[in-house]
Amino acid sequence: MGMRAFLIRRILLVIPTLVGVTLLIFAVLQFFSPEQRAVILMSKPGANIHDVVREFGLDQPVWVQYANWMKQILRGDLGWSNSINMSVKDVILTRWPATAELVLFSAPIIILLGIYLGIKSAVHRDKPLDHATRVASIIGWSLPSFWFGTILLAIFWGGLHWITRGQLTTDATLYIDLSKAAATPYFFKYTGFVTIDSLLNGQLWITLDAIEHLILPAAVLIVIQIALIIRLMRSSMLESLNKPFVIMARAKGLAQNEVINKHARRTALIPAITMSGLLIAGMLNGLVITETIFGIPGLGNWAATAAIQLDIAAVLGFALFSGVIFVFSNLIVDILYAYVDPRIRLD
Amino acid sequence: MNPKTRFNEFRVRISPSLDEFRFMLKRMRKSPLSVVGIAIIVFFVAIAALAPVLAPPNWPDPFKIPNVKGSFVSTPSPPSVDAPFGTTENQYDIYYGVVWGSITAFRTGITVTLAAIIIGLIIGGISAYYGGVIDEIMMRFTDIIFAFPGLILAMAFVIAIPQKIDINLGITTLSFSLTRLDKVLISLVVVGWAGYARLIRGEVLRVKTEDYVEAAKAVGCSDFRVMVRHILPNAIYPLMIAASLDIGAIVLSAAALSFLGIGSVIGYADWGQLIFTSQNWVYATPQAPLMYWYTFLIPGLFIFTFVLGWNLLGDALRDVLDPMLRRR
């Protein structure tokens, strides 16, 4: 089987998985009575319950209901989020940049630093550096993200007054918000990413402000998630260092650097790629907590607020959305894996 | 057969496992991290066992944290004689909460893990033993759970599971009422069983082709007997490691749900819930911003140490039991 056949098969496999994802969310919906479901499903608040029941066929057999619900979802209608008075679709569209910003700020550091430390740890196995890295990663893995975040906030906000909670300082938020009301708007949201928009508007101070506010939440994500990468990379590198071709490379007198960088590391990276799916799941979970603690107006924060206010349409919409994101990121991971490891696609 | 020969036979039969166990203990003793892990867990077992002595129970429900002096003053009070670790808002005693919270933590970790293992054993075992279409259907079903980030799926279940479940049996109706903590436990099982199902499926597939299984089938053992007597005892080892690694993670997820405000109710002896109520007190006043430090520092320290203990133990177990890394 060539790369092309593999790609087609793998992409086709996404369809049943996505159907499964929607089925599970639909199953969760069945916990509610038809009247409650009508309230959850309505696309605008205050619609007539009887109309919604008819529209979704809530008095019809389950498969009819599923088909109607799917039609609605494919149209992008995920219901109305009562907790912030917007349609779920609009919330996702306006809030994803804040979340993505945080991911883009932390994920590269997690991956690169994690790989680096994992390899270092394996190469210096059972030396002080290895022990230190392992202890640090177990501690990071055991830290409750909500507690660690709270402590950081207490130190840097309450103790040192370096930052405030939120995405920006009040000055910057005011500057942006007042632009909306001004006769001639002076701040344009080109991308929705605060860091990029402020640069495009020539307001460097807002960019710096936004970055300052990203440091702590990113630190929480990094400290907690990096443990996984370090651990994976360490064990995969240890295995790789014992492979015959690495021993051979050593035996023929290659320098240590060359053996590690050119031979061992390459093979060690392959299994680490497959496991990065776990990192994505961990990040999605972690974002809900981190955004809530630091008051970042992203998707996770919205989902947490919605959960506590029993805004069911929002929580289910968010769960569905993150399921879809997760399925597609796993697809990308698998394709990458097949790309670097020919054994997979020739299977 | 007289009891003595029977005992001897038993001893011979289990002697390899005993040797294995002794070897394991020896390896564990040599690793300082695992000793620390075990010490931490023993410490928490002691707190949980001695809870009625350390903090006299608040009858009728010992898991309801008492209000110090019976008052509901909304700002937390600092550590005092009445409340050694201070109180949360509304005067819930933090000391009482963390002591009884350790029972909640064990209960959460152990119930969820056991329930998830049982479901995983049934689904994974059947799936691997019968193979074919059954396997395909069950594994696709398992994949659906894996298609979601765990905490987010658990969130959806926690808010969707109703408080009261009625099962209509025709003649009579069975009613269960669930507490908020029950809902958290159920949601974590729903998310957690899939990993065990996959693990046990792989193990059963490995063991299934062994000669002794073929032999048992050849002499006419029933499917059930082959599975329970011959396959499971040989496939269950990795499950144990996974479970010990999981308990910490489960307690962490349960605490996260409580932190988000959808776990156990306010005033329940649960570490996550204590941190949830402390969120408003991270920044007290501009003059003394950290004056309520005890509300978030102390409960969090308990969660962290508890999880750390299990993770250290799990990590050591894996090193000890992993045939690739051992005996070198």
Image (spheres, rainbow, N blue to C red):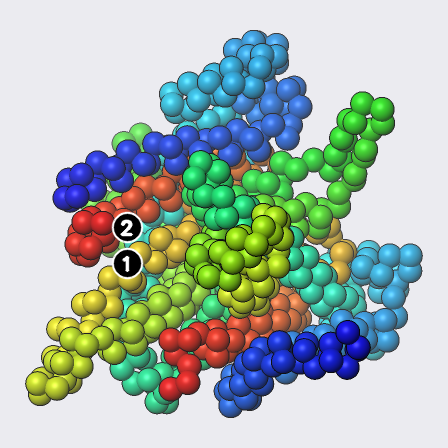
Looking at the image, is mark 2 or mark 1 earlier in the sequence? 1
The chain ID associated with circle 1 is: A
Residue ID at (42%, 75%): B323
Mark 2 in CB contact with mark 1 (< 8 angstroms): yes
- In which image quadrant can residue A90 be found? top left
Residue B99 seen in the current view: yes
Amino acid of disc 1: Ile
Amino acid of disc 2: Val
Residue A169 seen in the current view: no
Residue ID at (67%, 78%): B9
Residue ID at (20%, 55%): A343
- Tell me, for residue A333, which label it has, or none: 2
Q: Please, is residue B157 above or below residue B102 in the view?
A: above
- Tell me, for residue A273, which label it has, or none: 1
Q: Please, is residue B166 above or below residue B65 in the view?
A: above
**Would you say A88 lies left or right of B167 here?**
left
Q: Closest to the observer: B10 or B165? A: B10
**Mark-to-mark CA distance, 2 and 1:** 7 Å
